[in-house]
Amino acid sequence: MLLSRRWRALLATTTAALLNGAAFAQTWSACNPLSSTSCPADTALGMTVNVDFTKGEVNSFVASGGTPTYGSDGVTFSVARSGDAPQLTSVFYIMFGRVEVTMKAAPGAGIVSSLVLLSDTLDEIDMEWLGADDSEVQTNYFSKGQTTTYNRGQFNPAPNNQAQFITYTIDWTAERIVWYVGGTVVRTLTYDEAAGQYPQTPMQVKFGAWSGGDPANPPGTIEWARGPTDYSKGPFSMHVRSAIITDYSTGKKYTYSDTSGTWQSIRSEGGEINGNLGNANPVTVTASATAAATNSLSPTIPPGGIGAGSATTSSSTTRSSTGPIPDGWILTSDGKIVPVGSSTVNAPNSILLLATPFCLILGTFAAYYRL
């Protein structure tokens, strides 16, 4: 059936509004709960999702910094030229929880594959793989964006990480963080050991690849990434086959009741902080590894973990361009955001990318039926 001229014009206008990020950018402007009590609420995961990226894209993760591709190896993040930093960022947040990612790290001098948990207050938990060495992973953490000291990082064993898929796990509670490579515990950090620098606010999940060895980067970053990067030898690709993410809290949204940045200040709408902690399956542990000596890291490494484009500082933070799940839509256990009562139809990516008011979509269809 042919669309009328009026409908085509209306559809074009609506599409332009959906795709114009500037039109809605003010909804998700930078806001750090350490300095403001009016920051937008964080969309809570409140459950477990098991995402199989070999089946294609899911709309609970938003791409930036480049264009991830999908195939039999899952989602691929390729760095081919200066400035490439493709990544996926979750629409949702977890308030304590477990992140399990099965992946191959990218090869290449100066190339960095990253798994990052990052909060609005700049609490951060990282795993990073340097393409110049396929035998180890760097584990790291930050609190409130404080980067006055760089003595928190460790290099831990992760043999053959570029040639085979390995499951990496970050298990994060109020008492400790445990990093796993396969079934091996490679590092444990307790709340007390962090000496006031413990990450404890709702986190988004980000993963992707970038070039720390780009010649445009500061010398300290290039040195840390074991660059420089020779792009003529690329492209350099990181592959993520699947991700299982469990929120140890329940509810729909997380808010900050004050500006302290403590986990006790976090409130859950319709749920409970740590309400799902006892329901997660235990991690199967087959071994424990001795950590490498703590390394002093370059102060030019960007907090945020995935390229200069996603860097943040201790004085400000930029929220990712992800909006809340619209009313009438739900997140399924396989990571899809769908209308209530449906398990197959994905929510429009533009809703998630731009936080578009859901009424705009409804208004478009109402206008159509009046034609």
Image (spheres, grey):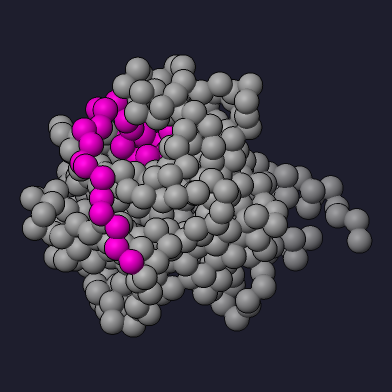
Question: What is the quadrant of residue 263 in the picture?
Answer: bottom left
- In this rendering, the answer to whether 307 lies above or below 76 is above
- Residue 277, magenta (yes or no): no
Going by the image, does 48 lie left or right of 267?
right
**Is residue 348 visible in the rendered structure shown here?**
no
- In this rendering, the answer to whether 132 lies above or below 199 is above
Work out which quarter of the rendered image holds the C terminus and state it: bottom right
**Is residue 311 visible in the rendered structure shown here?**
yes
Please tell me which residue lies in front, 183 or 15: 183
Please tell me which residue lies in front, 266 or 149: 149
Which residue is found at the position 24% from the left and 72% from the top? 273
Total labels: the figure holds 0
Please tell me which residue lies in front, 71 or 20: 71
The residue segment tinted magenta is 287-312
Which residue is found at the position 15% from the left and 32% from the top? 148
Q: Position of residue 176 (x, y in %)?
A: 20, 63
- Residue 311, magenta (yes or no): yes
- In this rendering, the answer to whether 336 lies above or below 159 is below
Going by the image, does 110 lie left or right of 125?
right
Q: Position of residue 18 (x, y in %)?
A: 60, 47
Which residue is found at the position 67% from the left and 69% from the top? 345
Please tell me which residue lies in front, 26 or 88: 88
Going by the image, does 163 lie left or right of 324?
right
Q: Main secondary structure of the magenta part?
A: loop
Farthest right residue in view: 1
Q: Position of residue 269 (x, y in %)?
A: 30, 72
Q: Position of residue 321 (x, y in %)?
A: 46, 45
Work out which quarter of the rendered image holds the N terminus and state it: bottom right
Which residue is found at the position 47% from the left and 33% from the top? 132
